[in-house]
Image (tube, helix red, strand yellow):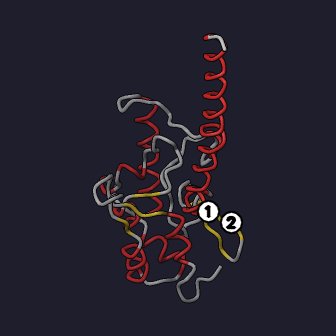
Amino acid sequence: MTLPFRQHLAALRLLAVLTLVLGVGYPFAVMAVGRLVPDRADGSLVRVDGRVVGSRLIGQEFAGDQWFQPRPSVAGDGYDPMASGASNLGPQNPDLLVTVKERKAAIAARDGVPESAIPPDAVTASGSGLDPDISPAYARLQVDRVAAARGLEPAQVTALVEDHIAGPDLGFLGAAHVNVLELNLALLTLPGQGA
């Protein structure tokens, strides 16, 4: 065998091995790992009575005073997972400042609180526009409105909020937060609050 022929044969063998390892083996290994954590691999879907009502990872809109409200969204027409993204407006942008002021006034009127008590996450969208979590301060701010709309004692709703506060991820990444979908679904478990 000549040297060029042996080199080509070695290259073809290497191509075949790498194709099997990286083109077949690696994708199947990644898929297998994904199956070990199906909740995360399938989008962390939340089901109620076998029906998908949302995802723990994607914010969604809730209409009515009886629900805790999420962060504002600028994703598409609002909470559109196919159009995730931020407004890209800087903190001194006049349009953003007007929008924040309008949101503060609306929340203050809806929840009966002074504008100075409204946390930043209540009036600003996240980088994705689809953040499923709010700060504990924003959740607590909404307690009286939700309790009144549902005919519940504020202490009952406050206890529910406190039970749904999650600490920073891995104990040190980010801040404490409350998942709005999980909190709203927990409201339905209270006596007389079924779907």
Which residue matches tag 1? 45
Image vertical order of residue 58 relative to residue 24, above or below: below
Quadrant in which residue 100 is drawn: top left
Q: Position of residue 156 (x, y in %)?
A: 42, 83
Q: Observer-nearest residue: 141 or 125? A: 125
Name the image quarter holding the N terminus: top right
Q: Position of residue 82 (x, y in %)?
A: 65, 42
At label 1, counting other C-alpha atoms closer than 10 Å, the crowd grade (few under 14, some 14-19, many 20 or more) is: some
User: Is residue 166 rendered to the left or right of residue 127?
Assistant: left
Provide the secondary structure element on which disc 2 rests.
strand
Q: Amino acid at mark 1?
A: Leu
Provide the secondary structure element on which disc 1 rests.
strand
Confirm whether residue 62 shows in the render.
Answer: no
Image vertical order of residue 124 relative to residue 56, above or below: above
Q: Position of residue 132 (x, y in %)?
A: 50, 56
Q: Amino acid at mark 2?
A: Val
Image vertical order of residue 51 relative to residue 81, above or below: below
Name the image quarter holding the C terminus: bottom right
User: Is residue 1 rendered to the left or right of residue 139?
Assistant: right
Say which residue appears at 62% left-offset and 34% top-offset: 17
Say which residue appears at 41% left-offset and 57% top-offset: 108
Q: Observer-nearest residue: 49 or 67? A: 49
Label for residue 18? none
Quadrant in which residue 64 is drawn: bottom right
Which residue matches tag 2? 52
Q: Could you tell which of marks 1 and 2 lies nearer the N-terminus?
A: 1
Q: Observer-nearest residue: 183 or 29? A: 29
CA distance for labels 1 and 2: 7 Å
Image vertical order of residue 82 relative to residue 89, above or below: below
| Pointers 1 and 2 in contact (C-beta within 8 Å) | yes
